[in-house]
Image (cartoon, helix red, strand yellow):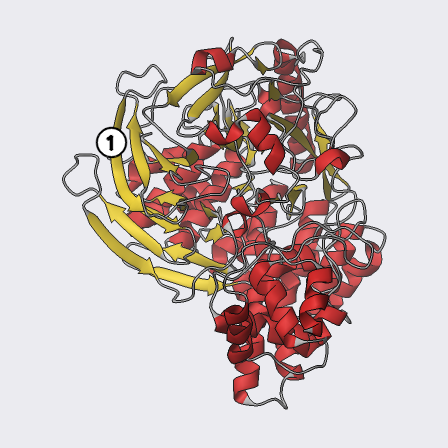
Amino acid sequence: MKKVLLALNLLTLLFVFSCKEKQYVDKIYEKQEILKDAPSNFLSPEESMKTFYLPEGYKVELVASEPMIDEPVTIAWDGDGRMYVAEMNTYMQDVNGSGTNQSISKIKLLEDTDGDGKMDKSTVFIDSLLLPRMILPLENKLIVNETFSYDLWSYEDTNNDGIADKKERVYHNENRRGGNLEHQQSGLIWNLDNWVYTTYNPARFKFKKNEVIVDTLENMSQGQWGLTQDDMGVMYYSGAGQENPAYGFQHPAVYGAYDPPGRLAEGFIEPWPVVGTPDIQGGAKRLREDGTLNHFTGVAGQEIFRGHKLPPSMYGDLFIPEPVGRLIRRAKVKNENGKKVLYNAYDKAEFMASTDLNFRPIQAKTGPDGALYIVDMYRGIIQESNWTKEGSTIRPVIMRKGLDKNIGKGRIYRIVHEDIEPDKRPNLLGKSASELIKYLGHPNGWYRNTAQKLIILKDDKSVVKKLEAIARDNSSIFSGDKDLGLERIHALWTLEGLASLSNDLIIEKLKDEDPRVQVMAIRLSDPLLKSGYPSILPLLDVLSKSNNIEVINQLALSLRYSKDKKATEILNFIGEKYNENEIIAHSVTESLKKDDSKRAQLIEWLSSRSLSDKKRILNGYDTYSQLCVTCHGIDLKGAKTDEGHLIAPSLMGSARVTGDKQTLSKIILNGLIGPIEGKEYGIMLPLKDNSDNYIADVLSYVRALNDTSLVSRHEVRNARNKTKDREGYWTLEELKKEESK
């Protein structure tokens, strides 16, 4: 009877939502004739806003602009709605990227004091930074990471003047982060599971009241600029280098990277700009006959919209900024028999597009007010200097259009609907843990996640009973605009963050009326499976008969943590029953490997090597996994695009890898351009800013897998000395001439 009532409740809810949707039917802007050769001159914020195309009913409001902000790259709000803005003030100030590494960038603190939605107060919260990349507000502190570093610093304003006066390093890694600006880590997102994640770096962090806990994950997705999560804590990555608009979103990151074919609907990778795209690195092959971008390339700063002050149909959609195409894609996330598939919300059109050549959207964010925020770096050049050197296809276009002169500005917008009033600024920082609990069921995901974070940081165990009461309430799934299933999920993870989640409550929630809560209860049982908790497997065996595909897949993911033969039996049962479901079949296959990780296999393979060789090769493996895997693939055979093309050549059996060590070192130091065995792959970027040890280790890992000798730091140093005056990339022809000398 309960299941029947649940189904009726869900059907009623869907009917109510569908009725609401009729009030907000999206009508895309009238198709415009493409502006093939737009001028590149700066426009005022008001003039630029007139160039935006949005669906009917939506409008853009200016939140902040120059001179209040300058070269903004990322934003975040504290619990009271004050906005932190990280600026990269030295980014591409000319076509050569001169002065990039000066430590003069800033983080601003903006406030809307009169509640009109526009920022009217600004202070320089932190100055003298080297290209700040990541910011995470805690309670009264801001966590910051800078380019070329793994370190995390905590900044605090102790006298409430809007300027940080206390600085403390909370995480230190002595290694320098390698690669160019576009291949650095980003993110620093407090996930539903209370771990803070970044891209590239396999480390994740837990921020407690008085400590930071560090953990590492193997085989996690390796994104570039931007990271977001949905209501279930599943994260969405993107990769401009791979021209890959979205991946990593089939299951939580802790279970490893998995990107099945077909996750992007047919035609999804084609953007639909309203302006010609002259400054494209790929040249003519990346343009249509009308001069517009024909393939995503600069994808960055994506966001699952979880706000409550735009039409309900937008909730849960993925918004992907494309700064090269001057547009923002809205993607519908559809679950097709367990596989999440992304569809463009419109037919050959985008949610937002502009004819202003300086419009450079690089981040989308759900705001505390329930609106969608857009960070516009507003500048001429968006590509980093490695792509604008002499000989590149893009440099002449930059010079002809004068894009190199367009610097020193920036805008932040919010997208609202003409029929819906955004909320006012929040007021959470002064509230007790008990007062924050009610926000765990707020219709805006920003509130739910922020309340969970703040309760955990307060470490106030007096709220445990209240949280348990919320988690145990199965009376309904929805109440008005409150999703009680999500409220229970946040209550459970808040208890986990307070180290107060009982085994009994986890077991109880395996029988919750809401399948989403069941999924979370299974995931929260992972530690019980690891420890061999005796009564958990029979309960999970019962759930293996569930008709809910998400419940089954989470079982298949979690059972990898049990070494008990009963776990293997359940996995085999699921595998046989769902052998034609590619998502579940993959989860079962991976879980049946149990602890057979790639790194563990590598360690075993290296058992006969000397201790120093093991250390160097494993260091190289770690570097390769963070930096090189994006293009060369986890198996060194080249990563593939969704169309099946190799992004970079295979390193297995490569004559350049197994050949002369000096030549190989030169390629890594200065990069490589031009055809390789008759194929064009793009540019192999230089890594000469990294140490000799760093380069020697990663080359040693690649050569070890090719069963040939390692590379020493002395060999890298010799190659560096011989090419110290060289600035440009190598070509294979030049390298052959070098070898013959």
Left or right? Give the position of 84 relative to 377: left
Quadrant where the C terminus lies?
A: bottom right
Q: Is residue 307 toward the left or the right of residue 699 in the image?
A: left
Q: Residue furthest front?
A: 741
Image height check: is 597 above or below 282? below
Check the image and report above or below for 441 versus 48.
Answer: below
Look at the image and tell me in which quarter the N terminus lies.
top right
> Which of these two is toward me, 614 or 566?
614
Q: Is residue 400 visible?
A: yes
Describe residue 654's horizontal placement relative to residue 169 as left or right: right
Q: Amino acid at mark 1?
A: Thr
Across and down, in percent, residue 692 comes to 49, 72
The picture places residue 733, in percent across and down from the top left corner, at 73, 61
Q: Position of residue 465 (x, y in %)?
A: 36, 47
User: 718 or 339: nearer the eye?
Assistant: 718
Q: Is residue 132 or residue 98 the one in the foreground?
A: 98
Residue ID at (77%, 58%): 676
- x, y percent for residue 707: 72, 81
**On screen, residue 507 above or below 295:** below
Q: Count of labels shown? A: 1
Instruction: Specify the quadrant of the image occupied by residue 701.
Output: bottom right
Secondary structure under badge 1? strand
Q: Residue furthest left?
A: 159
Tell me the quarter of the picture where residue 128 sits: top left
Q: Quadrant of residue 703?
A: bottom right
Residue toward you, 12 or 226 = 226
Look at 17% across and 34% down and name the residue there: 161
Which residue is the site of mark 1?
123
Whether residue 562 appears in this view of the structure is: no
